Image (cartoon, rainbow, N blue to C red):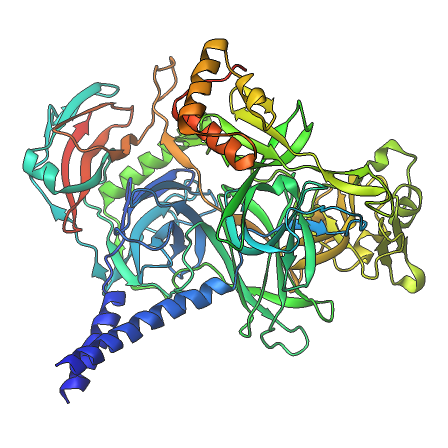
Amino acid sequence: MKRIIIVLLLFWVNVGQAQEKEHIALFTDRDIYTSGETILFNVIVPSGEGSAMININLINTRGKIVCSVNKKISNDQANGFIYLPDSMKTGTYLLCSSTRDNPALTVKELFICNRFAGLIETTTVLRAKDITPFVEKPVIEPKIEGISKSYKVREKVKTTLRLPANFLTNIKDHLFVAVVESTPGYNSQTFYMTNVRKNQDIFEKEGIVVEGFVKDSSTDTPFNKGCIFLSVPDSIPWLDYLITGEDGYFHFQLKDYYGEVPVVVQGFDPAKKKLLKISLNQTDSIKEGVPAYESQAIPMDIQKSIGNSIEATTMRKIFNCQEISIINPQLKKRHEYPFYGVPTETVHPALFIDLPDFNEISRELLPGVKFRAFNRIPTLNILNPTTLNYFNDAPLVLLNGIPVQDLNVIKNMGSKDIDRIEICRRERFYGDLDFQGVVAIYSSKQANMFLPESDELIKLNLDAIQPDCSLNIPREHIQNEPDLRKVLLWQPEVKPAESIKLDFETSDIKGHYKITVRGINLDGEVIYTEQTFEVN
Amino acid sequence: MTSKLLLYTSIAGLFLSLNVAAQQTSMNSQTSGKIRGARFIPFPNYSGKPYLYDKFLVGEIELTEGTKISNLGLSYSTYRDELIYYNPAISAQIVIDKISLNGFTIHELNGKSRHFRRQYCAEYTHDQSYFEVLSDGALALLAYRKVNLEPCSTYYSKSGLAYAPAFSYFLYSREKGYIPVNQTRNSLLSKFTKSDQKKVKKLLRKNGIVIADEPGFIKAWNLIEEYQIQPIF
């Protein structure tokens, strides 16, 4: 009996370790936004987080993703931005942060107002109810010195943040400091929800994950030993592949890709040489529904404040004042040469007389390449330079770096459609794949024109890692140009010290502002202190 | 008490091993750092050795992106300066693209390892070549293990051609480049100033080093490196 109890205890400890994970802390610059503005966010993840990436989704009250951002976690923090398109409807939205490792989603409510529709659409706000709130611990030790109750517009403010020695020893990593416009009477809630975890064994350690399942097109059952290609068309195209197991599951990690990356995923049966059906896993975090809501009327003073905010955003747009600047990451050269090898021949059809189709191009311009379209079934073969016989199998045919299985796609491509053709006449190997020669066609036209999307060929414009940004603060004011900043200071990674200087300048926007200092203590609690002031 | 302890330890071990197994299953589905190359075309059969070793030996390669892949069956073709690996999954001998590699290491059966790295040498090999690193430091001692197909007596080879070694040795500094050096005492001494030559001679004499073969040559160079006597570039 005792043994059974001990075994159960051990099991409970093992399971408990997996479940009791600290939560992600999520902060934004403000609680109320208008379309056309940018949300600045700061995320603090628990130390020991298995994933190196954090996913931030902005969803509407029905759970549909409006914007999605992936950020790299560095020093247990991630700072990013979300641009709010003008197509957004006025209403409540939820900003959800999640990692593949953490079982909980941290969600923050935001109210976003369309700057064209204003508050005509609604004068009520939906607030989430029956939630598990995110708790921050207020602290009194950090002192913000030199701050007045009110300032004039465009006044230079010099303050000092003093941190006592006992506070410094209790703080972990960096502090977060922000000076932003606040809306008294409206505090958005931050709460937790259950994360529908996708595949707990696969963490985004190197880059974002593209995952899904491959199925047999005829039987719709998971396909064993299917070859999945992931192509990234680029100046030097890249291809990754893997062989699926019995469950038909596959996943790729896109390492060090920033911004929007065009990706094509295809499944292929190596034995029967036919395409397979691909279904990609969606990235929507809240699958198990959204929280329940209750409606609240928006008080008149907040309605007025939103009206002013809309005007300010519109003026910013007129004067083309960018809120943030993107810091382009230092990119190293990814690949020296294409995955299919250094070409043995490169042909530029534009240098020759115009040829109407690929059959003519292969006959006239491509040495050792035989393209025939007898009985409407095109075939392509490459002459083996060693044996001087044609290879038995068809070569790997690529269109802008994307593998093409159906040669009818290239059949009608003439000189005007093709920039260059690269040929590898030797038998090439890429991992465990064997290509009996390679014909890589590069077209100035988008490959999308020739390769239609289907269940067997999925094209994605993948939101890879978001680059970092910095807040735009005008160094000198141009005459007659308004300064309509709502975020006066945004320093997400301030190194703790006894005395920290916080200098900023107020903008032309009158109203209430708050200085917030946040951090994580050694117990893993989020601690903060706030001080408000007014600009008249 | 001991049996109980054993029972609990084994249960804890079982939980641990389950966790590890779960992680490994997920990792198997993707291989990182795919090797790129072309099918190996065998050389004509002449006398002499066109390979560093007669058979494939276990080794590891380092790709340009920094990924290291170990436990590969490798063979270095000294004749073509190519690295061949055997892929058992597809039963193919593949010449690995030289530009995809930083270098490779071959482990001999006696436990010794030989490390080669890809370097560009404009003056002597006029190309990217694999150099064996005999001694690595601020100044490295490198060997270019070239084998040439040369005419020979038909008594030696019926076809009148044989693979003949034409190894070259270099002192290499990242900043200053290559100095060719022969595997002789005089050639090594000629790379130093008059005053340094005396020091080198004394050093070799005191340590009883005779440069008669490659190990002696390497030993001599390591000693010179240790005493930081700089050659003339």
Observer-nearest of A279 and A490: A279
Determine which quarter of the picture holds residue A18. bottom left
Q: In this view, does A478 lie above or below B102?
A: above
- Image coordinates of residue A416 in percent, x first then y, are 84, 39
Residue occupying the far bottom of the picture: A1
Residue visible at 44% across and 42% down? A466
Observer-nearest of A176 and A246: A246
Q: In this view, does A486 lie above or below B41?
A: above
Q: Is residue A275 above or below residue B37?
A: below
Residue visible at 40% across and 61% down? A62
Observer-nearest of A440 and B7: B7
Seen in the image, is B84 located left or right of residue B62?
A: right
- Tell me the quadrant of the picture where the C terminus of chain A can be found: top left
- Image coordinates of residue A495 in percent, x first then y, are 22, 32
- Image coordinates of residue A210 in percent, x first then y, are 51, 57
The answer to whether residue A78 of the structure is visible from this angle is yes
Observer-nearest of A60 and A207: A207
Residue visible at 92% across and 35% down? A353
Seen in the image, is A42 located left or right of residue A82?
A: left
Seen in the image, is B227 located left or right of residue A1?
A: right
How many numbered callouts?
A: 0
Seen in the image, is A323 located left or right of residue B29?
A: left
- Image coordinates of residue A168 in percent, x first then y, are 11, 37
- Tell me the quadrant of the picture where the N terminus of chain A can be found: bottom left
The answer to whether residue A184 of the structure is visible from this angle is no
